[in-house]
Image (cartoon, rainbow, N blue to C red):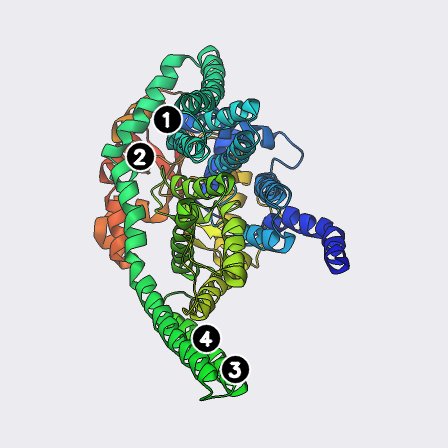
Amino acid sequence: MKREETVQSKRIRWEPLLLLFLLLYPLRHVHWGVDFWDTGYNYANFQYMGLEHMDSMWFFATFLSNVVGHVFTRLPGGNCLIGMNVYTGLTVSGLALMAYWFSTRSLHMPAEIAFLGELVAISLCWCPTALLYNYLTYFLFTGCVILLYHGLTNENMWLLYAAGICLGMNVFVRFSNLPEAALILAVWAYAVWESKEMSKDAFWKRLVRYTGWCLGGYLSILAVCFLYIHVRYGMTNYVQGIRRLFDMTDAAPDYKSTSMVAKMVFEYVDNLYWIERIAVIALVGTVVFTVLRRWSQTSAVQGNISAVPALMLCKGAAVGWCLVAALMIGWLYRRGFSSLQFFTYGSIFRPGISFLTLALGMLCIQMLRPSLEAREKLLAALAVLMILLTSIGSNNGNMPSYNHLFLPAPYILWLLYRFVRYLPKLPFPGTYWKWVSLFPVKVIVVALVGLFIFQSLMFGGSFVFAEATGVQDARETIDHNDVLKGIRMNPERAVWMQEISDYAQAHNLTGQEVILFGYIPAMSYYLQMPSAFNPWSDLPSYSVQVMEQKLDETAGKAQKPVVLLERTYMLYMQGGVQALEDRGLGEKQIEKIQANDRKIALLQDYLSKSNYELTFQNDKFVLLESAR
């Protein structure tokens, strides 16, 4: 008893340091890297929020994210990249602290396991924190799960109402969060699990009451948000923007629901190549150790061998199996299961999908155990839904699920800890592991999870998103750009950004409207030049028809916007594919540019009719201004 009290007192004494670490760890890379894609693109949308400089489709589809981001730009330090990285990074801190508090206070999880789970979850956040529509989604999703758990287990209907509000708000954080309504399945499942000693009438009353309070909160916040949008922007504009969101799948088929789900399933199926081989190793070990255990116990009873040699034999076999597990890890690395280049996704992709596979398997077993309490089954169901629903609405496969493990990661690690340390029997009553040895399975699981944790932590220490890859050699800073003050980038990017920043400052381009093309939407924010209509018009989701309409409207303006292109696009306009080949571009890069042929033709026509002239170029950018 005294030992337990000592451990508890140590835990309480060290906990403030753990909480401080979780608060600050997400801010470790706020001064790293210049990303020409998502980071600056989202910050530009926050700074220039509204239908004047944003496309209505994305403005309404991520409405609350833009509102919160716009508030951040008004805070001290919100006018520079480091400041915005801090504010958005704190959403990750809030997520980790909320999940840690729930895990330790509500689930009574050991603080060390909860902390490790949150550390892994933060480290796997590959997505830039600038994408608030993701992190606010995760924050409200996690809050909803916590409220559902407490509301159901404590029969508190107001908490269920609040959970519905969180889920309803998420529709305005990101419209593709609609599938999260499937969380109601966990509510219904809990009602079923609780109904063992309940009449049918009582069960249906309880089910309707649970559903009604959740639905009430959901519909209430929908009504409030719709009313505000109607008064502020007009419901017609909202409907038109969301309708275009559904229409974009014609030009961007990877956003179709069938394509997204198929990609998720394919990644699990494809990774079975590794899972099957790991399972065979564990099975072989189980058979060998079961036979060895049976033989040693039988021989000892019959007097053929004394207990001491039998014990030494088993211990020797255990050490040998640990070596086998180490060799398995080495084999996995050698065969390309995971990479030690931690600035790339390759370092965490297969360990991540393997961990999710293991997690889903254990969670399903939890839900199927008849002897388990309803609240434990509810936790398992909520964790399954979090893992699966998070990736729906994205064209990144299961990568979003890696990004949202703040509740599942500590819970899964806790289940694994209990499995390794305590599991004495099968998941179903009446059958015991009398002769079967689970030691080989436990060793293999520990090795695989250990690999996952190691890769995750190293990835978290090295990876910073930049155009879907990782930042490397971030050691240079630039002058004459207040937005990028203090930001470290590689020398090549530093030259590009220094040259165009100097030009923009010398010619007073700050505040002027700009048309951007060539996967450089972030330049609107970095140069403080609001987009004339949409900073990322070369995305397939932005239709040719809408771009044509916006260019026609822009052509009618007296003050023409500056046009900033990625240089390879200008080379393609001037010399076609041959110019790109001469520059050394690969086949995939050329195909990516050619995919925008219709939009490039529209832009060429606009430049010609509006008498644009080349006024600046370097190795990355080309800037044109109208002579009128």
Q: Secondary structure at mark 2?
A: loop
Q: Which residue is mark 1?
A: 57
Q: Tags 3 and 4 in contact by the CB under 8 Å rule?
A: no
Instruction: Report the mark closest to the observer, 1 or 4.
Output: 4
Instruction: Report the mark closest to the observer, 2 or 3.
Output: 3
The number of discs equals 4
Q: Tags 1 and 2 in contact by the CB under 8 Å rule?
A: yes
Instruction: Report the mark closest to the observer, 3 or 1.
Output: 3
Does 568 appear above or below 67?
Answer: below
How far apart are the alpha carbons under marks 1 and 2?
10 Å
Q: Are there few (<14), some (14-19), or many (20+) residues within 10 Å of tag 2?
A: many
For marks 1 and 4 on the same chain, the one whose residue lies earlier in the sequence: 1
Instruction: Report the mark closest to the observer, 3 or 4.
Output: 3
Q: Tags 1 and 4 in contact by the CB under 8 Å rule?
A: no
Q: What residue type is disc 3 on?
A: Leu
Q: Which residue is mark 4?
A: 326
For marks 3 and 4 on the same chain, the one whose residue lies earlier in the sequence: 3
